[in-house]
């Protein structure tokens, strides 16, 4: 991953950190000139992913980076934890699937909000990357 | 953080002004349900104009609260869902926020008063004028 102009690492340990992370995502989004719709999408996606961290892994981190290049304005968010991992990522990305019995939109809902969605998960390490971009 | 619950006769008004943490949201839910039972509120308007992020958790808390209050016997309306919040919620999943909504508090109160009037089972002593 190319190093960003700006990058912020937010530890996710308590539910309050979810609020901190989604605000940081919105702030960077706004600063890079994304519209209100995109600001809301990214803030919501970050909120969903960081809540998963609290719920399934207890703690983790959220890194929000400006990875814009000559052609695109881009924000990349990496949400990482050292929890039990997602046994079947394909299943976890299927609509209507939930392990927590929640009414949450889950990963499929979050994926629909962003332009890019990547997931790698094994016991002890789950990394989810999302990105929002627009042409310059 | 405590969210003020305002009383207007037998209608309760709640305006969520801040980005709530999960704990704040649960606190809000139990405070409101208790208050509705306490005064036997006929209607509840929940104003979320100030919320610029409503994720699936918050949507569920709002929905559940509306259902709980409905079970007690009150009419509920959610006011002021922001356009980008509406877009995001629908993009995420279609059933996230199913409660009755109104553009703003004013319209919300009209809807509540109309619904309470058509129920016909209770008279609002405090509002004799209409």
Image (cartoon, rainbow, N blue to C red):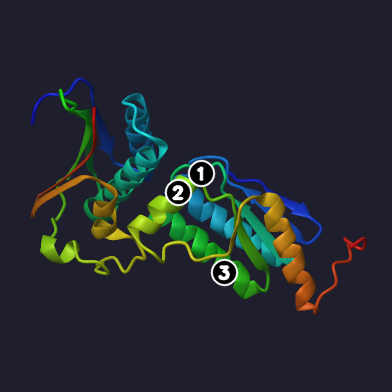
For numbered disc 1, what is the local secondary structure?
loop
Q: Which residue is found at the position 37% from the left and 45% from the top? A: A15
Disc marking residue B51: 1
Q: CA distance from mark 2 to mark 1?
A: 8 Å
**Mark in the foreground, 2 or 1:** 2
Disc marking residue A68: none
Residue B38 appearing in the image: no
Tell which subunit mark 3 falls on: B
The answer to whether mark 1 and mark 3 are in CB contact below 8 A is: no
- For this orientation, the residue located farthest to the right is B129
Q: Where is mark 2, residue-wise?
A: B85
Relative height, residue A131 to residue B92 (above, below): above
Disc marking residue B68: 3
Query: Which image quadrant is residue B17 in?
Result: top right
Q: Position of residue A57 (x, y in %)?
A: 21, 51
Tell which subunit mark 2 falls on: B
């Amino acid at each position: 991953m190319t190093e960003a102009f700006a990058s912020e690492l937010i530890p996710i340990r308590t539910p309050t950190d979810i609020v901190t992370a989604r605000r940081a995502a919105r702030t960077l989004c706004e600063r890079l000139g994304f519209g209100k719709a995109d600001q809301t999408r990214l803030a919501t996606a970050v909120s969903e992913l960081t809540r998963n961290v609290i719920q399934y892994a207890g703690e983790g981190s959220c890194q929000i980076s400006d990875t814009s290049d000559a052609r695109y304005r881009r924000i990349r968010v990496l949400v990482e934890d050292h929890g039990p991992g997602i046994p079947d990522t394909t299943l976890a990305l299927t609509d209507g699937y939930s392990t927590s019995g929640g009414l949450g939109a889950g990963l499929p809902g979050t994926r629909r909000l962003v332009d890019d969605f990547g997931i790698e998960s094994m016991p002890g390490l789950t990394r989810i990357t999302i990105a929002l971009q627009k042409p310059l | 953080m405590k969210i003020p619950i305002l009383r207007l006769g037998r209608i309760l008004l709640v305006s969520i002004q801040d980005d709530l943490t999960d704990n704040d949201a649960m606190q809000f839910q139990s405070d409101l349900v208790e208050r509705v039972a306490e005064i036997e509120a006929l209607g509840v308007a929940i104003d979320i104009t100030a919320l610029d992020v409503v994720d699936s958790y918050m949507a569920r808390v709002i929905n559940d609260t509306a259902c709980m209050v409905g079970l007690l016997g009150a009419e509920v309306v959610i006011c002021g869902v922001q356009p980008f919040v509406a877009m995001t919620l629908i993009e995420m999943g279609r059933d996230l926020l199913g409660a009755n909504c109104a553009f703003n508090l004013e319209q919300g109160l009209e809807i509540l008063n109309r619904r309470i009037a058509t129920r016909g089972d209770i008279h609002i002593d405090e509002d004799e004028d209409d």
